[in-house]
Image (cartoon, rainbow, N blue to C red):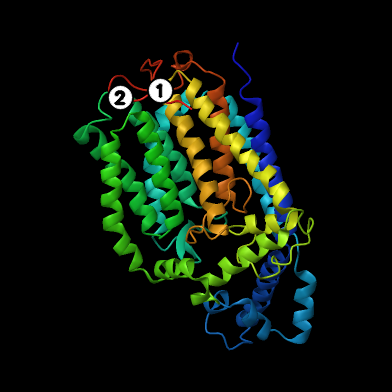
Amino acid sequence: MQKKGDSLLKLTVVTLAVIGLVMISSVSVFESNNLTFEIEGKNILREHYANNESDFESEAQIDNLSLGAVKANLTPQELKTVNGLARNDFYFWRHFEHLVVGLIVFLICSRIPYYFWRKFAFPMFVIAVILLAVVLTHLGADYGTARSWINLPGLPSIQPTEFAKLALIFYLSSWLDQREDEVATFNYGFLPFVGVMGIISAMIALQPDLGSLLVVILISTSIFYVAGANTFHLVFGSLVAVTLSLPVMLSMDYVKKRFLAYWDPNTDILGIGYQILNSLVAIGSGGFWGAGFGKSVQKFGYLPEVQADSIFSAICEEIGLLKVILFLGLFAVIAWRGYLIAEHTTDRFGKLLAVGITSWIVFQTIINIAVNLALVPNTGITLPFISYGGSSLIMLLAASGILVNISKGSNPKNYEGFGNRRRIGRAHLSRSSGRRFSL
């Protein structure tokens, strides 16, 4: 009889997802009101344009208006009408919809034998590359400094980078499992690994989404290291990558500003430094006990993207240091259980898959929190399970469901009809050239 899976892991993941919904209901009130006001205001301005009652030259010009510009172009009566239509719960209900879909996906993925996905590893990788390429076309949508979304008429926008993270984990786990005896070699292990990782990394860098790029590199390196990589190759490759990429990154104006603001937030006090300073104000304002649920001050326009990138700062302000420690303990549980599952899974593919999924959650959490604490430059990535973002939440819940299924101790030999028929079931991650994963 198959096991039920890691109950503590399941409970922790669901708890974090619910906490995310609760916190978004609190911190996104101001942003929800502004967004819905802007949407309803632009609808009125489009009607004026369609009736030749405005000076706008195109609908695109209306679409690019800021909130202040929208207000300036509305009559006092229209302002009153739009105020009545604006809602404080927009982000809550949108995130609720994402959460329902995500929990269904989580349940399904926890029940499907993880080895079933192996035969789809390469097709998923190809699809991920295609979607990332589509982002760079006219079908892609800008948000902030990155072109990371695909907007198709009549369909919800999607962020292919989140799917690419899971697709890369699947493909690397499958590919490295098949190359067990070659992983530690330079020509047949390291160079091909750099090529596979480089394809996804290059597509993400072109957006440019440097936060997701960093997460992808850390995920890939974790899988490769545990698979039995030569440590010298990794260190050498990392030094070469930093040496070659840093000058290119610093030549980008917005990247340069982020580094400068990191060193001294006062150099860009109305730009990136504004977010850094207000994040620290929010965290410090929470004290030990917090201001109380719903009583954040910084959420009222002081924290940019408070429902997304900056949500950790708002959480600190509302619940305080002591509760934040408990909150962070939930992520520690996922790290503990995830790597423990990898340790006790006798199937090499399952081990690598568990390491990749767990590393994804762990590294993305660490980077997001470090940004909010001004320990690293702003990267613009979300806090797993907590921040607003449908693509991120659904993909993370799907990956967590797969991790739960790995914890059931499924024997891939029992599911040869579902996946690759190559029989595997090695007791160790690698032979003489590799290393055994241990805690």
* 5 to the left or right of 142: right
**In the image, what residue occupies the spot 57% across and 56% down?**
154
Compared with 326, 153 (above or below) is: below
Task: Name the residue tied to disc 1.
Answer: 348
Question: Toward the viewer: 323 or 12?
Answer: 323
Label 2: element kind? loop
In x, y percent, where is residue 298? 69, 67
Compared with 116, 411 (above or below) is: above
Cα–Cα gap, marks 2 and 1: 9 Å
**In the image, what residue occupies the spot 77% across and 53% down?**
289
Which mark is drawn over residue 180? 2
**Mark 2 belongs to which amino acid?**
Glu
Which mark is drawn over residue 116? none
**Mark 1 belongs to which amino acid?**
Arg
Question: Toward the viewer: 104 or 183?
Answer: 183
Question: Toward the viewer: 63 or 107?
Answer: 107
* Residue 140 in sight in this render: no
Q: Residues within 10 Å of mark 1 (few under 14, many from 20)?
A: many
- CB within 8 Å, label 2 to label 1: yes
In x, y percent, where is residue 269? 54, 76
The quarter of the image holding the N terminus is top right
In x, y percent, where is residue 158? 52, 52
Q: Earlier in the sequence, mark 2 or mark 1?
A: 2
* Residue 12 in sight in this render: yes
Compared with 238, 343 (above or below) is: above
* 321 to the left or right of 360: right
Label 1: element kind? helix
Looking at this rendering, what residue extends furthest in the front direction? 288
